[in-house]
Structure formats: C-alpha cells, structure tokens
Image (cartoon, rainbow, N blue to C red):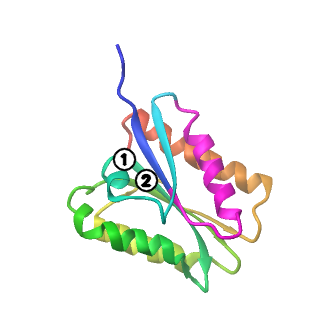
C-alpha cells in the first residue's frame, strides 16, 4: 500500500547566506520523516501553487531593521487573496535570524498568518546573531518536529 506523502513548504529569504543555511537545515530535519515531501523555496520563487499544494509551511526570515524580509511580505502580498480561504488551518512555524532582536519580525509574520487563519503548531525559533551549531541543530529539530506532527496527523 502506497501512503500519499504530505508536503511541507519551506519558504525563506536570504541575502548573506545565513537564512539559506538555516532553511536547508530545517529541510534536512523535515526530510528525516519518510512520508514527508519537502519543498525548499526562496520567497521570490515561491508561487500560489506551492502554497495551495502544501500540508504545512515553515517561514524563515532574517530580521531587517526590526521587520521581516520584504520578499517574505511580497510572497504574502502575492498569495493572500487567492489562498486565504483555501489554507485555513494550515500548520505553520516561523524561524528567524536576527542581528538585533527578531521579535518584531515574528510578530509581523504571526499577524499575517492570523489573517490566513493558519495554525501555529510549535514555538517559533528566534536566533540572535550568527547561528551556532547548536542553533542549527535546533532548526533541524524544528523541521523534524513539524514533519513528524504532519506524518502522524497531530497537526
């Protein structure tokens, strides 16, 4: 019997490479679950179809000037009207890398997720400064947790 795979969309923006590294580690963690298909996409390249086709979403954003990355906001702007009634209850989690604090970037993404009526399933991860190997391990664990929750039907 072939079990259909559930899909996680990992959406991120990175200029200097730090968030790209974090998103890849999240993807590695999520891919540890056999019944989960992982799509890793830069926000600029992600489409409405990517959002509508996923069973869970992880959003990785650097903090820029106390806010989420503009390309993350751009993705939301491009998809909101067409996806908000189609993605109600979508499990989501946020991971942020911040030079300063990161809380405001998380708050902004949470407000948008509330507009979509998505379901926060884990505490969001906020890393201040350059991520250590422990931080990257935490990102990977967050990915595996989201994937396992989807696989087992918890989320």
Tell me whether the residue at label 2 lies in contact with that at label 1, contact meaning CB atoms closer than 8 angstroms: yes
In the orientation shown, which residue stands out farthest toward the top? Answer: 1
Which residue position is annotated with label 1? 54
Label 1 secondary element: loop
Q: Is residue 134 magenta?
A: no
User: Would you say 154 lies left or right of 88 here?
Assistant: right
Residue at (51% x, 72% y) in the render: 106
Q: Is residue 54 above or below residue 5?
A: below
**Residue carrying label 2:** 57
- Rendering quarter of residue 109: bottom left
Which region is colored magenta?
Answer: 11-33
Tell me if mark 1 has few (under 14), some (14-19) or many (20+) residues whose alpha carbon lies within 10 angstroms of its own.
Answer: some
Residue 90 horizontal/vertical position (percent):
33, 53
Few, some or many residues within 10 Å of mark 2 (<14, 14–19, 20+):
many
- Give yes or no for residue 28 being in the magenta stretch: yes
Picture residue at 40% right of the left edge, 49% below the top: 56
Q: What element carries label 2?
A: strand
Q: In which quarter of the image is the C terminus?
A: top left
Q: Is residue 143 above or below residue 36?
A: below
How far across and down, in percent of the image, does residue 152 sit? 41, 33
Query: At 49% across and 37% down in the image, what residue appears?
Result: 148
State which quadrant residue 114 falls in. Answer: bottom left
Q: Which of 10 and 117 is in front in this view?
A: 10
Q: Position of 76 compared to 60: left or right?
A: left
CA gap, disc 2 to disc 1?
7 Å
Observer-nearest residue: 22 or 149?
22
Q: Residue 82 placed where, x, y %? A: 23, 64
Q: Is residue 72 left or right of residue 31?
A: left
The label on residue 107 is: none
């Amino acid at each position: 019997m072939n079990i259909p795979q559930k899909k996680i969309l990992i959406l991120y923006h990175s200029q200097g490479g730090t968030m790209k590294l974090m998103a890849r580690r999240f993807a590695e963690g999520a891919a540890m679950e056999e019944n989960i298909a992982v799509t890793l996409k830069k926000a600029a390249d992600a489409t409405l179809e990517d959002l509508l086709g996923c069973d869970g979403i992880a959003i990785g954003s650097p903090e820029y000037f106390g806010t989420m990355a503009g390309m993350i906001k751009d993705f939301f702007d491009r998809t909101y009207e067409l996806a908000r009634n189609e993605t109600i209850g979508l499990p989501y989690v946020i991971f942020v890398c911040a030079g300063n604090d990161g809380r405001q970037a998380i708050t902004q993404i949470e407000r948008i997720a509330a507009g979509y009526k998505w379901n926060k399933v884990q505490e969001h991860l906020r890393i201040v400064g350059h991520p250590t190997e422990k931080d990257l391990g935490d990102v990977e664990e967050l990915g595996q947790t989201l994937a396992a929750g989807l696989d087992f039907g918890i989320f």
